Image (cartoon, helix red, strand yellow):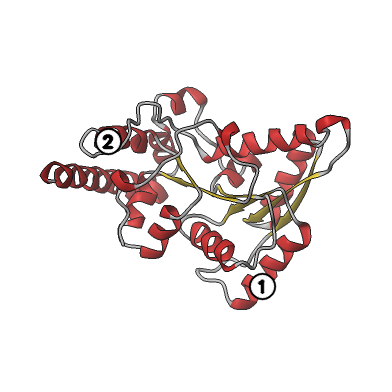
Amino acid sequence: MALYLSETTLFTGSLADLAPTKLLITTINAHSYNVAQHDEAFAKSLHKSDVLLPDGISVVLAKRWLSHSVKTHSHASLKKIAGEDLFYYEMNRLNVETYHGGSHKPTKVMFLGSNESTLQKIKERTAKEFPNVEVYTFSPPYKPEFSEIDNTKMIEAVNAIQPDVLFIGMTAPKQEKWAYNTVNSGRLAIDNCHVCCIGAVFDFYAGTVTRAPQWVIRIGMEWFYRLIMEPRRMWRRYLVGNVKFLWGIFREKFIALQI
């Protein structure tokens, strides 16, 4: 099961339109599109998400282009919504809702992922910027796959906190597959919680990785900034990956034209 962007429903509304119920929210960019072509479990976790955000101008432009050749509604209103956008929306929402209606109702957020040092930096910054939100963290072991013991510890930690929002930052595709399997297993006893897979946002917010300036992001060149900043780690993802992404989109377009 590969992921076809032409057949994938992307979120086209405002984040303020998100339902106040349990939602699994993931993002898709050119890199995750490429990975999903040969990782069936990852493709499924994206397809089956309650909300899939277009986290990349390349995905937005590709979806609009493909929509002209398939029998779907127009995607003219589609715009990039990054994981960082989701993060700030949720944190601001919780910070305000703490005193919604004039009564004190503690709101809780949990960060699941990364290392203790990064999580501590996140706690220190959120305490200043979002003082009305109770922040909890859990750092899972750093390994390719989690054991059943690992999974149980993470699930029990989340259930004990009962967060209003659960941020997961374990890099793609591990975080999406873990979130999808865990949410659908019924083992996460969290009602009305937004489960958000936001990956690198943990490092961006903690300051351990510098994100591109806003003007670079606005013109759709954040990928180039990251390539320049970390060429050894990012060259394959962007130089090779961008070619793979374009090939995949052209292939979808060609197939659609034959139908």
Query: What residue lies at 54% left-to-right and 46% top-to-bottom?
Result: 200
Residue 8 coordinates in the image, percent (x, y): 36, 47
Is the residue under label 1 in contact with that under label 2 (CB below 8 Å)?
no
Task: Check disc 1 and give the amino acid type.
Answer: Thr
Q: Is residue 229 above or below residue 217?
A: below
Side (left or right) of 110 relative to 36: right
237 or 131: nearer the viewer: 131
39 or 68: nearer the viewer: 68
Q: Quadrant of the N terminus?
A: bottom left
Task: Check disc 2 and give the amino acid type.
Answer: Ser
Query: What residue lies at 32% left-to-right and 30% top-to-bottom?
Result: 74
Q: Which residue is mark 1?
A: 152
- Label 1 residue SS: helix
Residue 181 coordinates in the image, percent (x, y): 53, 65
Query: What residue lies at 84% left-to-right and 41% top-to-bottom?
Result: 105
- Label 2 residue SS: helix
Q: Which residue is mark 2?
A: 67
Which label was assigned to residue 29? none
Q: Residue furthest top?
A: 215
229 or 31: nearer the viewer: 31
Q: Residue furthest right?
A: 103
Residue 107 coordinates in the image, percent (x, y): 78, 43
Cα gap from disc 2 to disc 1, whole angstroms: 42 Å
Q: Specify the quadrant of the image occupied by residue 182.
A: bottom right
80 or 190: nearer the viewer: 190
Residue 98 coordinates in the image, percent (x, y): 81, 37
Query: What residue lies at 80% left-to-right and 32% top-to-bottom?
Result: 100
Disc 2 residue crowd, few under 14, some 14–19, many 20+, Cα 10 Å = many
